[in-house]
Image (tube, rainbow, N blue to C red):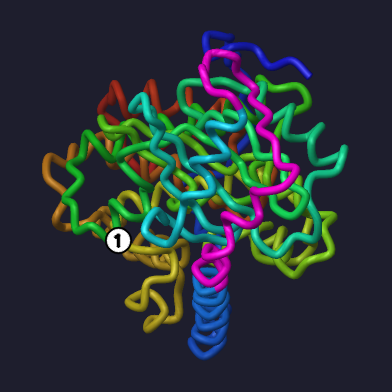
Amino acid sequence: MECPDENSSTGSRSTGGGKTGKLLISASATVGGLLLVALMCFWGCFLYKKLGRDESKSLAIEVGGGASIVMFHGDLPYASKDIIKKLEALNEEHIIGCGGFGTVYKLDMEDGNVFALKRIVKLNGGFDRFFERELEILGSIKHRYLVNLRGYCNSPTSKLLLYDYLPGGSLDQALHERGEQLDWDSRVNIIVGAAKGVAYLHHDCSPRIIHRDIKSSNILLDGNLEARVSDFGLAKLLEDEESHITTIVAGTFGYLAPEYMQSGRATEKTDVYSFGVLILEVLSGKLPTDTSYIEKGYNVVGWLNFLISENRPREIVDRSCEGVETESLDALLSIATKCVSSSPDERPTMHRVVQLLESQVMSPCPSDFYDSSSD
C-alpha cells in the first residue's frame, strides 16, 4: 500500500447538501431510553478501565519469552531488547489512558524520547499474519495531523502498539477533565487539524481508510494544541476478532450516524457525521450526550436543531470560550449542520469540509448563517 505524504493534493471535490437551516434529526428517543443507553456506555467504559488496570500488573510476564519489536520507521536507534526491557518495567503508575481499545502507557526511553504504548485487551493470542499485514499498512502512513504508529511488540500473548507520544493529551481531557479554558482560536485550529487528518485518510490513502470511531478522545494534542487523529484503522483491524470489544470500538454512542446505528455499515459519510458531532462538542464544551441535553430529550445534534428552529443557534457555544468571532462561528455552525444531516447524501465529503473550514472559518466573509449556500 502506498500513501502519499502530507503535501499531497487534497483536491477540490464536493458533494451536494441541503439547506443549512433545515432540521436534520428529530429527537425521537425518549429521555428514559437515552439514559439507559448512556448508562450502558458508562458501564462498558468502567469495565474496560478496570480490566486494563487489573491486567497491567502482568505486563512484564506478557512481553517476556519470545517477544520481539517490529519498527516501521528506521530512524529510532533502539534494539528490540532495549524496548522490551522498558516494557517489562511498566506498571499502573505509567498508565495515561484507558479506552475501548485498551490501556495506554507512557514509555520513557533513556535518551529522552517518549512514546505511547497501547495494549489491546481481550484479544485471543498474539499477532497473526493478517494483523501484522494490516499494521504494516497503518505504520506506512505519515501525516502532520495523524498520530504515527511507530511499531509493535510481537508477543505470543499480547498486542502492544507503539505510537508517538503527544504531551497535550486528548481533546476529551482538555474539554471535559482538565478544566482548561480553550479560547476560540485554539478550538478552531483543533477542528481544522482534525478535519485535515480525517480527509487524508478518506481521500489520499490507498486503500482509503474509514476511521469508524471519530470522537474527542481519539483526537490527541501536541504541546502547541495542534490536533492529531489517533486510532484510525483499529476498528476495522479488530472487527473479525471473536470478542465483544468489536461492538464498542466500531463507534461511540453520541457520535454515531443514524444509518450506521440501523445497518452497522460504516462509510466515509458516517465518519463525516461523527466529525460534525465533534465540531459541536468543541463549540459547546459539552459531551454529545451531556445530561443537560438528555434532560430535554435531546443529544447535541437534537439540541442544535432545536436552537435553529428557535432562531438562536449561537447559544450552543461554550460561554467560557473567549474571543469568539461571530462570522467564523456562523460558518462553523453551517458546516456542522451539513455534516450531521440525517441524509448521508446531503453531507459533504471531508475534502469539502476542509475547503469550507479554510475559506469560511479561517478567512471568514460576512454571511448569513440561515442563508448559507448549499453544497
- Quarter of the image for the C terminus: give it: top right
Which residue lies under the disc numbered 1? 176
Classify mark 1: helix, strand or loop: helix
Return the x and y of residue 231 as percentages of the image width and height.
58, 43
Between 173 and 76, the one nearer to me in the picture: 76
> Is residue 289 rendered to the left or right of residue 163?
left
- Quarter of the image for the N terminus: give it: top right
Q: Quadrant of residue 29?
A: bottom right
Q: Answer above or below: position of 323 versus 289.
A: above
Residue 226 lies in the magenta stretch: no
Residue 53 lies in the magenta stretch: yes
Q: Name the residue rendered at 79%, 36% in the picture.
A: 132
Return the x and y of residue 307 as percentages of the image width and height.
34, 63
For disc 1, the neighbor class at 10 Å (few under 14, some 14 to 19, many from 20) is: few
Between 299 and 368, the one nearer to me in the picture: 299
Between 222 and 90, the one nearer to me in the picture: 90
| Residue 5 visible, this angle | yes
Q: Residue furthest right?
A: 129
Q: What range of the chain is rendered magenta?
A: 51-79
Return the x and y of residue 295 as percentages of the image width and height.
37, 84
Q: Name the residue rendered at 58%, 12% in the picture.
A: 5
Return the x and y of residue 210 as percentages of the image width and height.
69, 40
Residue type pointed to by label 1: His
Between 153 and 369, the one nearer to me in the picture: 153
| Residue 375 visible, this angle | no
Q: Quadrant of residue 263?
A: bottom right
Q: Answer above or below: position of 164 versus 304.
A: above
Q: Name the residue rendered at 64%, 54% in the picture.
A: 120
> Is residue 98 rendered to the left or right of residue 212?
left
Q: Quadrant of residue 28?
A: bottom right
Q: Name the residue rendered at 79%, 45% in the picture.
A: 127
